[in-house]
Image: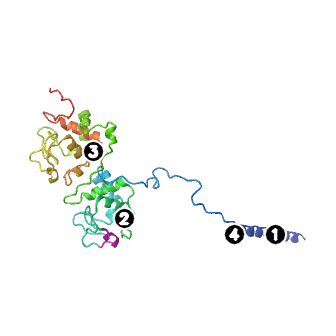
Amino acid sequence: MASLEVNKACAAVLVAGVAFMLSSVIGDGLVHAPRLEKPAIAIAAPPGTAAAVAEADPPIALLLASADPAKGKADTASVGCVACHSFDEGGKAGIGPNLYGVVMGPHAHMVGYEYSSALKAKTGPWTFDELNEWLKKPAAYAPGTKMSFAGISNPKVRADIIDYLHTLAATPVALPTPPAAAPAAAAAGAKSFDEMVAAADPHHGQQLTLQSGCIACHTFDQGGKAGLGPNLYGVVGGPHAHMVGFDYSSALKAHTGPWTFDELNKWLTKPAAYAPGTKMTFAGLPKEEDRAAVVAYLRTLSPDPVPIPGAPAAPKP
């Protein structure tokens, strides 16, 4: 009798379970919840994520103005370029072609290398803009390329690498001119470089020549000997090749006229951009106030310092 009651209880549980399952299946078949076209709650990407920074990159010409070719050379190792490419003149191809002379060369610039049809279809030279797009995402620039490299999302890293590639030539081409600064800066009362030199501290400029390593190549005293670079006494207002007997590069000797404040400002910003092919390996001083201080110091290295336009003449001792 007891076993009969147990069997009835088990049967009841099984029947209830089957009935629940069938009702669920029938309900799903009869009622279809519409798929939302977009989430009910939009979650914005936090700053710094790929979605948040997927806006237009700064112009490559602007980034190249402050790029560092030495950093770019190091980056070719850190991102893996050296695993497939060689960079020395006459270097052999690896998985990828040798890259000496690639900037402003044709897309299929290495004779004898088997480029993909996708890349051979690209006409014209490897301009700075073209290289920027290629390094950003090769598969998007040339769909079907054999290049398996995913790309470099950081535009500053791309600029450093392109700047390094630009130096790999017997006579590097000139870097592109960066876009002009917004006129609003002048309207806001921005100082001219002459005014910055007038207000700068020459002593601070002297300290910067120590901190930035200028003294490793140059001397500053009157009659001082040349090192890797020329002696800089009397450079302000003097000709570009101002030290008699020093073997200047053709790139620098091609610049005529004196070393004005503005010319020195351009040179100290980025020597490789001011005189492509220069022997000067110094990357440059990115801050204009630092450049003004250095020029203010160099200006003092003369028995009769060049006057600053618009500034009152300093009394002679």
| Residue type (three-letter) at the residue carrying disc 4 | Gly
Asked where in the image residue 260 lies, by quadrant, the reply is top left
Categorize mark 2 by other alpha carbons within 10 Å: few (<14), some (14-19), many (20+): some
Q: Secondary structure at mark 2?
A: helix
- The residue that mark 3 highlights is 285
Write down the residue under mark 1: 10
Up the image or down, 79 lies above or below 119; here it is: above
Percent x, y of residue 142: 36, 67
Tell me the kind of residue under disc 2. Tyr
Left or right of 2? Residue 208 is left
Q: Nearer the viewer, mark 2 or mark 3?
A: 2
Residue closest to the eye, 215 or 166: 166
Whichever of callouts 2 and 1 sits on the residue coming sooner in the sequence is 1
Residue 117 drawn in magenta: yes
Per the image, label 4 sits on a secondary structure element best described as helix
Q: Which segment did they paint magenta? A: 114-122
Q: Which of the two labelled residues, at mark 2 and mark 3, occupies the earlier sequence position?
A: 2
Mark 1–mark 4 distance (CA, rounded to whole Å): 29 Å
Residue sitting farthest toward the right: 1
Q: Which residue is mark 2?
A: 141
The residue beneath circle 4 is 29
Q: Nearer the viewer, mark 2 or mark 1?
A: 2
Specify whether residue 98 is painted magenta: no
Q: On screen, 312 above or below 181? A: above
Quarter of the figure with residue 222: top left
Total numbered labels: 4
Identity of the residue drawn at 23% across and 55% down: 174
